[in-house]
Image (cartoon, rainbow, N blue to C red):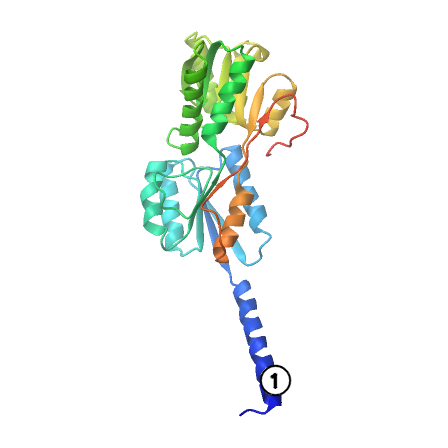
């Protein structure tokens, strides 16, 4: 039997050893990789910057990202490359849900894959953090219809056709108008890819074809901004058209204040919420597979009370 003093020394030694091991574990280095769709879009760029800010609080985490430059095939390759680099967690926001599905299904059992704002055509992913795009679109339809007096013509500027966000923002709006507002027509649906430049082209085409419209529903405030540019260039009074967008960026705030946009819907980048889920994954703590981040309608009534996302 060991002397009492020796036992005390042994206990102290083991305690220090365990404490050191725990410290080593807590300071283990991790690499988190974000396969971003594009940096040409202001919102997507802001999303990367907010991820950088969130992970900068953790000195043992290296945050890296790629830019697929709007190419769904390149984004697929970026995810695959990160997997082969043995990063600890992959974050992505799939430009093309169908294309991204097989690679996520293939790697998720070995490397956690966290989806942010956009999903894939499968439940085989680690976690997803997103606002409810269908619900936002439905609320946008109600807000616009009420302001229009439940009658009139609307044109829709859609986001990337293969992105789950755009699919839901389109369907939620169409379903709500169809089911609740028989005297409102969607007279044109044009793809704007979430970009100002493409929105300008789309609205120019609508004006050239003399398509009748009283309002514009844009899947992003960047496209709403492009629509205003096109209207002004055509000599059309922007205030004569009701415009509703999604994101709530500074441009939208200014436009709402100046009566050049009726409403926007706050669409967080979800970077902070996603980073918190990633930290739980790395620390092997419980996390929710799906996190729905709140959105909110912004009009002139509350525009001064809510900060834009950037």
- Answer left or right for 162 relative to 303: left
Residue drawn 44% across and 40% down?
Answer: 93
Which quadrant does the C terminus fall into? top right
- Answer left or right for 11 relative to 122: right
- Residue 282 position (above or below residue 128): below
Quadrant assignment, res 46: top right
Residue 63 visible in the current orientation: no
Q: Picture coordinates of residue 208 (x, y %)?
A: 43, 9
- Residue 181 position (above or below residue 22): above
Q: Nearer the viewer, residue 175 or 58?
A: 175
Q: Picture coordinates of residue 207 (x, y %)?
A: 46, 10
Q: Nearer the viewer, residue 115 or 224?
A: 115
Residue drawn 44% across and 27% down?
Answer: 169
Q: Picture coordinates of residue 223 (x, y %)?
A: 50, 24
Quadrant assignment, res 249: top right
The residue tagged with tag 1: helix, strand or loop?
helix
Residue drawn 46% across and 50% down?
Answer: 33
Quadrant assignment, res 265: top right
Residue drawn 51% across and 24% down?
Answer: 139
Residue 217 visible in the current orientation: yes
For mark 1, does the 10 Å Cα neighbourhood hold few (<14), some (14 to 19), or many (20 or more) residues?
few
Q: Which residue is mark 1?
A: 8
Q: Nearer the viewer, residue 72 or 273?
A: 273
């Amino acid at each position: 039997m060991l002397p009492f003093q020796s036992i005390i020394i042994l206990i102290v030694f083991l305690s220090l050893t365990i404490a050191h091991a725990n410290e080593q574990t807590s300071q283990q280095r991790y690499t988190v990789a974000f396969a971003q769709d594009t940096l040409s879009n202001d919102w997507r760029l802001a999303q990367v910057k907010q991820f950088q800010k969130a992970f900068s609080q953790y000195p043992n985490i290296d945050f890296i990202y790629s830019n697929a430059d709007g190419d769904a095939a390149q984004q697929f390759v970026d995810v695959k490359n990160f997997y082969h680099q043995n990063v600890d967690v992959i974050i992505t926001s799939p430009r093309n849900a169908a294309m991204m599905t097989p690679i996520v299904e293939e790697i998720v059992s070995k490397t956690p894959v966290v989806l942010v704002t956009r999903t894939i055509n499968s439940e085989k992913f680690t976690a997803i953090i997103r606002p409810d795009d269908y619900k936002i679109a439905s609320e946008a339809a109600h807000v616009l219809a009420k302001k229009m007096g439940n009658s009139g013509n609307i044109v829709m500027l859609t986001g990337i056709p293969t992105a789950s966000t755009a699919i839901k923002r389109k369907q939620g709006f169409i379903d709500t108008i169809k089911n609740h507002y028989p005297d409102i027509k969607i007279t044109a649906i044009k793809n704007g890819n979430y970009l100002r430049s493409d929105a300008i082209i789309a609205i120019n085409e609508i004006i050239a074809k003399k398509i009748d419209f009283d309002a514009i529903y844009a899947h992003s405030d960047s496209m709403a901004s492009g629509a205003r540019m096109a209207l002004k260039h055509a000599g059309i009074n922007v205030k004569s058209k009701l415009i509703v967008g999604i994101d709530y960026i500074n441009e939208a705030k200014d436009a709402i204040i100046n009566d050049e946009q009726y409403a926007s819907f706050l669409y967080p980048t979800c970077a902070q919420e996603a980073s918190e889920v990633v930290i739980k994954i790395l620390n092997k703590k419980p996390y929710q597979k799906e996190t729905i981040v709140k959105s909110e309608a912004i009009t002139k009534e509350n525009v001064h009370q809510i900060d834009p996302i950037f």
